[in-house]
Amino acid sequence: MSAVAESVSKRSTVNRLSAENVTLAYDQRVIAEQLSVEIPDNSFTVIVGPNACGKSTLLRALSRMLRPSEGRVLLDGQVIQSMPAKKVARTLGLLPQSSIAPDGITVADLVGRGRYPHQGLLRQWSAEDERVVQESMRQTGVAELADRYVDELSGGQRQRVWIAMALAQQTPLLLLDEPTTYLDIQHQIDVLDLCAELHETQGRTLVAVLHDLNHAARYATHLIALRGGEVIAEGAPNDIVTAELVEQVFGLRCQVIDDPETGTPLVVPAARKARAERQRLTTAS
Amino acid sequence: MKTRSMNRAVRAPGGLSLRLDLRALIVVALLLVAACAAGVALIGTGDAKIPAADVLRTLAGHGTAYQDFIVNELRLPRVLVGLLVGASLGLGGALFQSVSRNPLGSPDVLGLSQGSTAGALVVIVLMSGSTTQVTVGALIGGLATGLAIYLLAWKQGVHGYRLVLVGIGVSAIATAVNGYLLTKADMVDAARAVVWMTGSLDGRDWDQVWPLLALCAVLVPVVLAGARGLRMTEMGDDVANALGVPVQRVRLVLMVCAVLLVAAATAAAGPVSFVALTAPQLARRLTRSPGPNLVPSLCMGAALLVAADWASQRAFGADQLPVGVVTGVLGGGYLLWLLVTERRAGRI
């Protein structure tokens, strides 16, 4: 086998984005040690776990916002920090939790800023930029808002605009940090449907941090359950979401039943009485 | 601020494409015209009045020997220093306000002017230095203050409120130092110090023009090259990083440029108050465009300062005022208005 063929066959078994034995810390506070995670290509991966389990921190490391103090994050076989920033930005997009819409900016202008990594001093606004911006707004259903001011929009519309901006970046990988926070249930489902659609119709690899386990189980094709900076389980929701796992990860007693709509696992927390009963039994034994 | 920005793309074969904001271009053109008109009016003003037509003819080299001396030797340098100082302050202010995401994050509030003043007063009071030495002292004072603010406020990047609060603290310390130096000074030095502290363009000549012009020629292109990245950072560090902007590097480079511009301007003309605060805000209200509005702020600063200098010579009859008095009164009023409206909008 020639060297080229070998490297190609090797590549095909390796996913585009992964973290290898990373230690993640803010200043001195260590969030995770020796953590390894693979993001399967073309998956809709959702990271779940209790508060402060390190799920957003992991996402920050995967998107090179946080440099691991040990270990490395690999994108297409290269250490992500060693790659040119704009090149990474053409491969991997991030929708962070904290984003600020500048005063007096229109929807079309904001979405257009997603084209930054494709632009330069002499290539400021190509016909391609224009086309991609229009298409991104259409896909997210904000095309008719193009001339509106972002600060006039509702929370759900605004989130769609930010997603449109990330789409305009045209990256095969898109990371979303709690994209449904602060939205009411209708808009939460709306945003998740949009993500599922982007994943299914365009084959983009999506990685999202979600709080709601039932949303995660319904939409994810690949689930990563974290606790205390460790991966407790990963795989398809149907294979891994069990009452034992939920108790192990979240410390919550529950039943897992089939979602009547989709057949995916549905977590139903045990009633207060039943949980108290169990508490009594465990302390008695 | 509710008009759609008028962005137009200009494309040439070979992949070249430029994005132009028509409204901003028009604003820049009008401000340049206003700055030049104010400059011509300013040259014509004084004990020997010269009509605008004669000023223009003399500038083109066709005036009488007498006019040539008045216009090109005495008054043109003053106007050029005014234009350059105003442009530097406008651009520096726009950079500071964009990085701190706060109109109050301007060099006047942050204590850079007070730091420059401290440098100048040390030279005037303790060393009785020459005018050139005072300029150097002011420059050193401004740069040292910029460095102090940087060291105190920069913790893994700079954030709006920390910058403003640290700046207000540094400003208070510098003001205290200045007060102490003034009480130590004898009458002659104190009078000289107070004139310097008001900010004035009196007696500026070609020696002040060249260094400022050289500095602007170097720094303005550097700043404009970083403008696209700066625009992205207004959406938050994470968004900008995700778009491939090296946020910390862009910010550091632009802050260094802004400190140099403001320190040099202050060294040349004294702490002309509030131009750095008001120029970017006024420019922004004219262009109605989000983003740092760097070039419009630069032009606005130049126009404002020269117009204020002209007003300070004309408005009060025989009593000529230092330009800093006029910008102080106008800018201070504008600051109050800004505080009230920002408070109403819930941003302060």
Image (cartoon, helix red, strand yellow):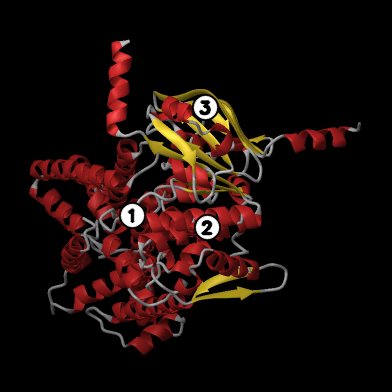
Residue B344 in the image: above or below residue A71: below
Query: Who is closer to the viewer here, B278 or A125?
Result: A125
Residue at the spot x=43%, y=38% of the render? A267
Residue that carries the numbered disc 3 in the rendered image: A231
Q: CA distance from mark 3 to mark 2?
A: 27 Å
User: Is residue B225 visible from the viewing direction of this image?
Assistant: no
Residues tagged 1 and 2 counted as in contact (Cβ below 8 A): no
Give coordinates of residue B218: x percent, y percent. Answer: 49, 55
Q: Amino acid at mark 1?
A: Arg
Residue that carries the numbered disc 2 in the rendered image: A194
Numbered disc 2: what chain?
A
Tag nearer the camera, 1 or 2: 2
Residues tagged 3 and 1 counted as in contact (Cβ below 8 A): no
Total numbered labels placed on residues in the image: 3
Q: CA distance from mark 1 to mark 2?
A: 32 Å
Give coordinates of residue A212: x percent, y percent. Answer: 42, 43
**Crowding at mark 1 (Cα within 10 Å: few <14, some 14-19, many 20+):** some
Residue that carries the numbered disc 1 in the rendered image: B101
Label 3: element kind? strand
